Image (cartoon, rainbow, N blue to C red):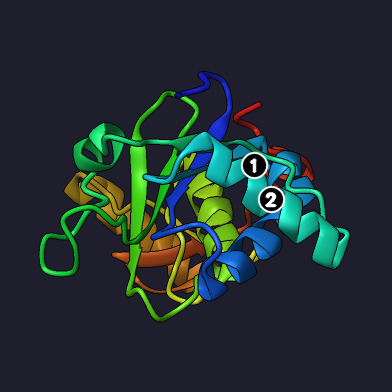
Amino acid sequence: MIIYGKWLILFSHPGDFTPVCTTEIIAFTRAHTYFKQLNTELLGLSVDSNASHLAWIYDIFCKTGIKVSFPIIADRNGEIARRYGMISSDISNTETVRNVYIIDDKGIIRTIFIYPMNVGRFIPEIIRTLQALQMADCSEGSTAANWLPNQPVIVSPPKTYEELIERVNHVENNKNGVSWYLSFKEPPEKCIDEDCNK
């Protein structure tokens, strides 16, 4: 399931032929090309059968003309869903909730979103979070609240008193921060031009 060298968005849905899930499958399909540009693949999962998945994506194609462009795991016994915590016993013992896992190119889960059954996922925020993770890794910094691509990143805090004094002077001279513990830098060109994790 993990594709080393690529990032992965693994997401579960409660069931095929359900209204909210259908809108999400369509939204992910429409954004799939953009995810690929970020060195990222999509992978859906539900406890429905493969035949059900095929019938559902065929129905989506027949009604909308949209071809689902990524695989959907048929996790009939719920083994994968249980391992990843995608089944909430408060809601159902068999249906998966709306989880999204952003898994990095080394197979490490970096972010988990959990949506309620009656609220669809916001794909632009998933993309923004993916971009923020990739930028933080590439720039060896952090991203601030409400960070958007091409905005400055937070410089890692100093680790010694000498570095603190140096940072205070740097912030005063360059007006690029609030204090020694919060200063910014422009993202490196390699992090803007392309995903440096490729």
Quarter holding residue 159: top left
Q: Disc 1 marks which amino acid?
A: Leu
Give the x, y percent position of residue 103: 43, 38
Vertical placement of residue 1 versus 94, above or below: above
Quadrant for residue 59, please give it: bottom right
Q: Position of residue 69 (x, y in %)?
A: 74, 42
Q: Position of residue 175 (x, y in %)?
A: 53, 75
The quadrant of the picture occupied by the C terminus is top right
Q: Is residue 91 visible?
A: yes
**Along the viewing direction, whichever of 174 and 44 lies nearer the viewer:** 44
Answer left or right for 63 relative to 4: right
Residue that protrudes farthest toward the top in the picture: 4
Residue at 43% over, 80% down = 119
Residue 81 appears left or right of 60: left
Can see residue 138?
no
What residue sits right under mark 2 in the picture? 57
Between 52 and 135, the one nearer to me in the picture? 52
Residue 81 % position (x, y): 28, 42
- Look at the numbered disc 1 and give the secondary structure of its residue: helix
Q: Are marks 1 and 2 in contact (CB under 8 Å)?
A: yes
Up/down of 84 relative to 174, above or below:
above
Cα separation, mark 1 vs mark 2, equals: 5 Å
Where residue 85 is drawn, which disc sits there? none
Residue shown at 74% from the left, 59% from the top? 60
| The furthest residue to the right | 65
In the picture of the structure, the residue carrying the numbered disc 1 is 54
Whether residue 98 sits left or right of residue 44 in the image: it is left
Instruction: Give the residue type at disc 2.
Output: Ile
